[in-house]
C-alpha cells in the first residue's frame, strides 16, 4: 500500500525540500503509528520534483527518492519514498532568511545557535545547517543540500536553544553536523553538495 504525501514547492524552488518531506512523514507517522512513534532516520538518494508516496515494502523501482525508519519503543519500522509522475502544483512563500536572522555563529568552533523558536523544527535545523556549511565552505560545485537525518529522540525543542555543530567536513562535498537542544544531543544531519 502506498500513501501520498501532501507536499508543495517552497518559494521559487523547482524541487521538494527535504524538511517538507520530513514534516509530511511525521504527520503520516502520527496517523499510522501513534504519538509514541517518530521518524528517526531519513536518507535521500536524489531530489524529488513530483508527488511522492511512502511505502512500507522495499520497492523494485527507479523512482526511489529515499528511505528511512520510524522508531516505536525500540522497534524500527522501515519505509521508502517513491516519486510518481504526478506534478506538484501547490507552492507557498518561504523566507529562510527570517529563520536564521536571529542566529549567532562561531566559525572557529564551527557552531551556529538559534534561541528563537518556530513551529517548524526541521526547517530551523536545515536552515541553520545550510548557513553554517556555506560560511565554512562557501566555494562548492553546486549547492549544499540536506541529505540525511539520524535522530536519537523526537525533534521537540520545548523552548530550548537550537545549536548545530559541524563535526566533520569531507572535501567540501559532505558534512556531518550534530543537532543539540540546549546541551542535549538530538542526532545529526548530513549535507551533501549537489545540483538541483
Image (tube, rainbow, N blue to C red):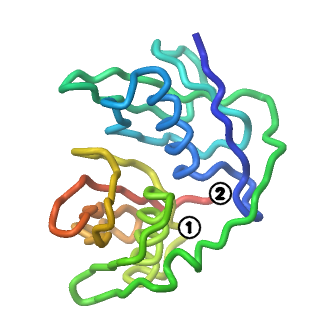
Instruction: Look at mark 2 in the image and give the residue it sits on.
Output: 196
Q: Residue at x 43, y 69 (%)?
A: 117
Q: Quadrant of the N terminus?
A: top right
Q: Earlier in the sequence, mark 1 or mark 2?
A: 1
Q: Residue 143, which numbered label?
A: 1
Q: Position of residue 60 (x, y in %)?
A: 54, 14
Q: Position of residue 170 (x, y in %)?
A: 30, 65
Q: Residue at x 37, y 61 (%)?
A: 174
Quadrant for residue 95, please give it. Answer: bottom right
Viewer-side residue, 63 vs 29: 29
Assess disc 1: are there few (<14), some (14-19) or many (≥20) residues with their C-alpha within 10 Å of its C-alpha: some
Q: Residue furthest left?
A: 183
Q: In the rendered view, does 189 fall on the left or right side of 80?
A: left
Viewer-side residue, 44 vs 105: 105
Viewer-side residue, 147 vs 103: 103
- Secondary structure type for disc 2: loop
Q: Residue at x 46, y 63 (%)?
A: 126
Q: Position of residue 134 (x, y in %)?
A: 46, 78
In this rendering, the count of numbered labels is 2
Q: Are marks 1 and 2 in contact (CB under 8 Å)?
A: yes
Q: Residue 134, which numbered label?
A: none
Viewer-side residue, 165 vs 143: 165
- Secondary structure type for disc 1: strand
Quadrant for residue 173, please give it. Answer: bottom left
Q: Quadrant of the C terminus?
A: bottom right
Q: In the rendered view, does 11 fall on the left or right side of 196?
A: right
Q: Residue at x 41, y 59 (%)?
A: 191
Q: Is residue 183 above or below residue 107?
A: above
Q: Position of residue 100 (x, y in %)?
A: 49, 79
Q: CA distance from mark 1 to mark 2?
A: 8 Å
Assess disc 2: are there few (<14), some (14-19) or many (≥20) residues with their C-alpha within 10 Å of its C-alpha: some
Amino acid at each position: 500500500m502506498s500513501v501520498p504525501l501532501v507536499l508543495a514547492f517552497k518559494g521559487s524552488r523547482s524541487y521538494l525540500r527535504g524538511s517538507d518531506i520530513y514534516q509530511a512523514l511525521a504527520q503520516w507517522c502520527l496517523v499510522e503509528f501513534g504519538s509514541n512513534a517518530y521518524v528517526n532516520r531519513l536518507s535521500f538518494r536524489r531530489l524529488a520534483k513530483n508527488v511522492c508516496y511512502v511505502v512500507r515494502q522495499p520497492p523494485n523501482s527507479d523512482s526511489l527518492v529515499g528511505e528511512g525508519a520510524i522508531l516505536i519503543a525500540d522497534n524500527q519500522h522501515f519505509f521508502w519514498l517513491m516519486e510518481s509522475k504526478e506534478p506538484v502544483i501547490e507552492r507557498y512563500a518561504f523566507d529562510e532568511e527570517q529563520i536564521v536572522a536571529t542566529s549567532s555563529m562561531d566559525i572557529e568552533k564551527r557552531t551556529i545557535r538559534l534561541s528563537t523558536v518556530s513551529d517548524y523544527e526541521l526547517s530551523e535545523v536545515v536552515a541553520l545547517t545550510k548557513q553554517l556549511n556555506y560560511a565554512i565552505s562557501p566555494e562548492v560545485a553546486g549547492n549544499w543540500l540536506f541529505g540525511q537525518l539520524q535522530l536519537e529522540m523526537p525533534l521537540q525543542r520545548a523552548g530550548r536553544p537550537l545549536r548545530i555543530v559541524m563535526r566533520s567536513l569531507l572535501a567540501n562535498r559532505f558534512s556531518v553536523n550534530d543537532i543539540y537542544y540546549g546541551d542535549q544531543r538530538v542526532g545529526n544531519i548530513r549535507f551533501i553538495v549537489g545540483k538541483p
